[in-house]
Structures are given as structure tokens and as C-alpha cells.
């Protein structure tokens, strides 16, 4: 009969084990209740599919600082150096001051923050490339919408950089069409798919109220980008090419913010590329 495969889990199993170890389950006999919340479903999931556990434990780690370990294909790798710039009244963290093809972290401050006070301050990643080409990429990382999903957590709780490894970020791959682009990477750490602006009634591990500030986080990146296009010697105006993209939760972020970016950034050509999630919901959806 028809079978449901754990290969549908966004590639997580493929990152962790060869295809021969990926388990299929007959329809109607999934090893955990789909409708259960994270606090009851995930322990059952881990015991039923043991090869998931290392990847899930790795994804939950919160000790990746600015010079910490990047995650690549489910494995930890040696970190590349990441420079950090903190914005202030006198420091704009201009693109012109950043070394080309190297990751930088910009900390905008203000109302930005991650979901927990115990993890990183909010920061976004910049990789300087051509002045007239910009990739605005929204990072993926699950979602947290209530106390159980936040306690697990089912979303990324720290703003961790990608660096110049893998996919559209790979500066050494000649087949990567974005290898020469300037990249503004909207990091994700509040669980609200880049649209939240709410203080919850429940608390984080330090006892502080959980705060989801995805709107402020995303807006801080866009405001920085707009400022770079307005400043001489940074981003060109108009851009020859503007691409707005994102993966998983970041796909929703790209769809939420694309119109804003396309209207504010003068450009000759533009594309919006939502990857792995279509923001289409029934009219009765919350």
C-alpha cells in the first residue's frame, strides 16, 4: 500500500545517514502521534527513529558564538573567522569597511533580540561581494508558537552564521550563480517566521519573559541594506540584480518582506525565490 517516508522531513535524515538507513513507515502506523505537541511527540520520535537523535541534539545546541562552530550538512566543522561590528550612533557598520568574501556579523541593537535572553544578541550576517548584486536571504529554523514548542524548542534560539560554506553561500563553487553577490543574511532566532512582535506570558530558561521580535529583527537588516544603498561607495543604486530568497521558515520571511524590499531598493532586475515552504493557508487559518 501507500507508504509515508521520513524523507519528507526537510532532508534532515539525508544529512545524518545514508539512504539505506532511512526508515519508511506504512501509512497509518507512524511511530509518533502527528497531532501531539512537542513535549510528548519528540521523545517518542527519538526512540522510534534513533538516527534522528544526534541531529536533533546538535540543532538544539546553544553554544555557537560568533567564533563558534558552524553546522554544515548535520555535522560540526571547523569554524572560519567571523568579524563582529556593533552598530551605534557613530558606527554604521558600512559594507565598504568589510573584507570581501568573508563573513561579518552586524549587531544592530535597539529593539532586536532573540527569543531567549540566554542566547546570542540578535545579529545578521554580511558577506561582501559585487556592489551591484545583492542576495537578501532569510535563514530557516523552525517555529515556536506556544509554551511547549518554545520549551523544546522547535525553533532556532540563537542567531548563528552560515559562513561561506554550502549552497548559495559557497564562494568557491563555480556553479554557484550567487558566488559574487553581496549577501545580507537575515539570521533567525525568535521563532516567529520574521513577523512577530509579542511578549509571551511564559518565561525563558533565565526566568525572563519570552519575547518574539522577528519583525524588528528583519526590519533592522532591511534598514541597514537601505542605508548601504544610500551611502556612497557601498551598494550600487540601482542594483543590477536583486534576489530575495529564504529556506523553510526563511521562505515565509522572504514572502513577507519581498514586496517591501522590491519597492525600497532600486534595481534593474529582481527575483523572489522562496525555498521549501509556500505561505498558502486556508481562510480559516490562524
Image (spheres, grey):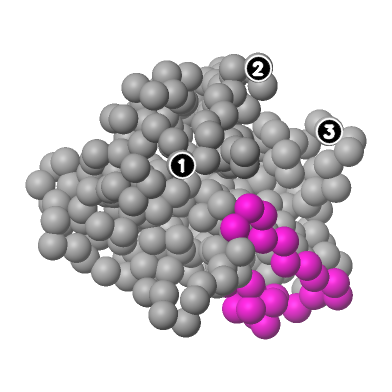
Residue ID for mark 3: 173
Helix, strand or loop at label 3? It is: loop
Q: Residue 142 at what x, y percent from top left? A: 44, 49
Residue ID for mark 2: 20
Helix, strand or loop at label 2? It is: helix
Q: Is residue 82 above or below residue 136?
A: above
Neighbour class for label 1 at 10 Å: few (<14), some, many (≥20)? few
Q: Are marks 2 and 1 in contact (CB under 8 Å)?
A: no
Q: Nearer the viewer, mark 2 or mark 1?
A: 1
Earlier sequence position, callout 3 versus callout 2:
2
Total numbered labels? 3
Q: Residue 31 at what x, y percent from top left? A: 39, 32
Viewer can see residue 71: yes
Residue ID for mark 1: 28
Residue at figure coordinates x 38%, y 46% from the top left: 34
Residue 262 forms part of the magenta stretch: yes
Taking depth in this image into account, of 49 and 231 the one nearest to the observer is: 49
Residue 1 forms part of the magenta stretch: no
Taking depth in this image into account, of 46 and 197 the one nearest to the observer is: 46
Earlier sequence position, callout 1 versus callout 3:
1
Residues drawn in magenta: 257-277
Helix, strand or loop at label 1? It is: loop
Amino acid at each position: 500500500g501507500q507508504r509515508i517516508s521520513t524523507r519528507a522531513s526537510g532532508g534532515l535524515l539525508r544529512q545524518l545517514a545514508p539512504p539505506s538507513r532511512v526508515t519508511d513507515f506504512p501509512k497509518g502506523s507512524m511511530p509518533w502521534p502527528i497531532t501531539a505537541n512537542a513535549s510528548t511527540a519528540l521523545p517518542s520520535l527519538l526512540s522510534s527513529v534513533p538516527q534522528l537523535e544526534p541531529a536533533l541534539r546538535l540543532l538544539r545546541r546553544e553554544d555557537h558564538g560568533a567564533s563558534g562552530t558552524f553546522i554544515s550538512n548535520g555535522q560540526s566543522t571547523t569554524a572560519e573567522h567571523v568579524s563582529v561590528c556593533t552598530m551605534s550612533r557613530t558606527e554604521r557598520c558600512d559594507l565598504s569597511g568589510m573584507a570581501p568574501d568573508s563573513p561579518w556579523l552586524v549587531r544592530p541593537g535597539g529593539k532586536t533580540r532573540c527569543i531567549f535572553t540566554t542566547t546570542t544578541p540578535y545579529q545578521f550576517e554580511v558577506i561582501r561581494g559585487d556592489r551591484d548584486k545583492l542576495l537578501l536571504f532569510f535563514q530557516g529554523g523552525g517555529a515556536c508558537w506556544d509554551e511547549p514548542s518554545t520549551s523544546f524548542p522547535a525553533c532556532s534560539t540563537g542567531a548563528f552564521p552560515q559562513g561561506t560554506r554550502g549552497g548559495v553561500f559557497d564562494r568557491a563553487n563555480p556553479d554557484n550563480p550567487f558566488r559574487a553577490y553581496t549577501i545580507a543574511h537575515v539570521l533567525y532566532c525568535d521563532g516567529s517566521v520574521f513577523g512577530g512582535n509579542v511578549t509571551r506570558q511564559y518565561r525563558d530558561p533565565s526566568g525572563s519573559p519570552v519575547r518574539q521580535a522577528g519583525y524588528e529583527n528583519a526590519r533592522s537588516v532591511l534598514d541597514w541594506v537601505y542605508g548601504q544603498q544610500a551611502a556612497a561607495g557601498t551598494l550600487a543604486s540601482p542594483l543590477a540584480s536583486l534576489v530575495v530568497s529564504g529556506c523553510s521558515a526563511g521562505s515565509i520571511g522572504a514572502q513577507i518582506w519581498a514586496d517591501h524590499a522590491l519597492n525600497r531598493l532600486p534595481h534593474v532586475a529582481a527575483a523572489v525565490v522562496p525555498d521549501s515552504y509556500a505561505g498558502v493557508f486556508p481562510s480559516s487559518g490562524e
